[in-house]
Amino acid sequence: MKLQFLGAAHVVTGSCYLLEVDGKKILIDCGMFQGGRQLRELNYRPFLFSPAEIDAVLLTHAHIDHCGLIPKLCRDGFKGNIYATKATCDLAGIMLPDSAHIQESDTEIINRKGLRVGRIPIAPLYTIEDAQKSLLQFKPVEYREKFALTDGITVIFRDAGHILGSSIVEVYIAEKTEKPVKLVFSGDLGQPDQPIIKDPELISDADYLIVESTYGDRRHQVYDKESALAEIINDTMDRGGNLIIPAFAVGRTQTLLYYLYRLWKEKRIDEMPIVVDSPLAIAATKVFVDNMKVFDEKTAELLQKNGELPEMPQVKICRTAEESKALNSSESSSIIISASGMCDAGRILHHLKHNLWRPESTVLFVGYQAEGSLGRRLIDGIKRVKILGEEVAVRARIAQLDGFSAHGDYQQILDWLGHIKMNAPQQIFLVHGESFSIQSLAEKIKDEYKYNVYAPFYADTAQIEGAQCNIVPANIPEVSVQKEMEEFLQLLDAEYRNWRKKLLLTVVKNPQIMESTIRQAEKAWRYVKRMFKDFGVN
């Protein structure tokens, strides 16, 4: 059998793995690349396989970086079934059309501007019609029920504890051995003891493990998250500003509402407007209500009195763009929860445009921000950003609360791996993480468990025969990469020389700026060192 890594390889998004067994081809996830422009452009290149030859798709969960290219896959020829839990099917039913709407809207804007300068119009990545058609191929499965995918291949979905419906996928492959070869795809593993979602299920054995590593170099802080959230809310309201929270529509928004409800009931925050400004988040919350049977026990107990989510009279829903725009002309302070979670698109951009320049407002990040995203740049301290074609000064308070993430940290992943008792995996593949996170987690796994660990690069292939696993690296022309790196270093050197000249002239005229300039230089140097560390250069 062969397992090829076609996404989430040394990056956090674009999850996609191609499993080939006895002429059958199965995809595990088919996700969209998100983040900086270079990553997003990967979504437009042709698949490295023929979609018509894929027999089935196994979908771990409904986040767009795991399912976002399914409409493209189906449009380009895939005719098989897409297997996922019922909750994942329900969420995909709202998320994929929403993603298609974004593709169409962005393309329309690009083409309108392009026509003015004579550019050829481009087509969207996929359309709403493509997304709706792809939903007809979804087939819901139950947690923990083994089903036959093809002759010789059976599958079990287990709860990954990440978002509603998220799954660990176990694939059993009958080969010429005493027992089937077992591959386990972790999907995205959640944190234990989180509201609404159950803890990740434990596995006792696996021959080959494909494990995420988003927080492979970090521990989540153990602290009173509710008190920290209350402090930020009260501080912002005292200053008369708005609290803007970029939040993923699925999972994070519902968790925030849970915490806000508790703070309000305990009178730790005032009764102020809490605005959910994301049509997708509104629809996703309804899906949550419809799937309460998979909630954890504490949340189910809170809701079982009337079978629906508790009401908060101060929560307002923005369904239309006009209602959303009106928020930015309001004089009263509000908590505004809007998507996207990494500030790459959607209504959140309008709220940032109208609030980043206000010192009294706060932008609060409660989730992972991918390298290159606007959210990451704001956290890293950028002072001016371009939003919707307009330059905006960053004067608002930029805050970040750890521990709200739907991903487990490295210790929680190690603990999860520690429950494998029956037989040690022949190989662990680390995916879905940036290079420094992957490297850190790989070292920790080797130190603690002595397992073989490999971090595949894009298009690498693992050839598996029972207990034997050989890695075939992707055929990437090293000369081209080396040339590009040399050109980049030349550009970096030229930029440094130009900056140094300007600095010396400025310091002569205004010596007081030296201290802040040194701080900026130190920050730039840390970024450069981190960049080279990604390439294994210390």
Image (tube, rainbow, N blue to C red):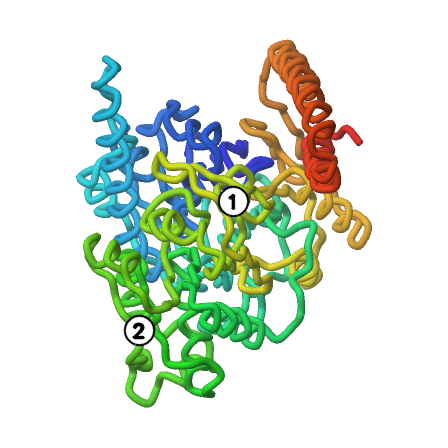
Please say if 119 is above or below 316: above
* Residue 422 visible within the image: no
The residue that disc 2 covers is: 315
| Disc 2: CA contacts within 10 A as few (<14), some (14-19) or many (>=20) | some
The residue that disc 1 covers is: 173
* Residue 159 visible within the image: yes
Q: SS class of the residue under badge 2? A: strand
Q: In which quarter of the image is the C terminus?
A: top right
Residue at the spot 32% in from the left edge and 50% down from the top edge: 347
Q: Name the disc covering residue 48, or none.
A: none
Of residues 512 and 383, the one drawn nearer to the viewer in this rendering: 512
Which residue reaches farthest bottom?
305
Percent of width and height locating residue 254: 39, 67
Please say if 201 is above or below 353: below
What's under tag 2, amino acid-wise? Val
Q: Earlier in the sequence, mark 1 or mark 2?
A: 1
Please say if 198 is above or below 128: below
> Left of 330 or right of it: where is 15?
right
What's under tag 1, amino acid-wise? Ile
To which quarter of the image does residue 338 belong? bottom left
Q: In which quarter of the image is the N terminus?
A: top right
Percent of width and height locating residue 113: 25, 24
Residue at the spot 70% in from the left edge and 55% down from the top edge: 423
Of residues 233 and 477, the one drawn nearer to the viewer in this rendering: 233
Please say if 410 is above or below 315: above
Percent of width and height locating residue 133: 20, 42
> Left of 266 or right of it: where is 86?
left
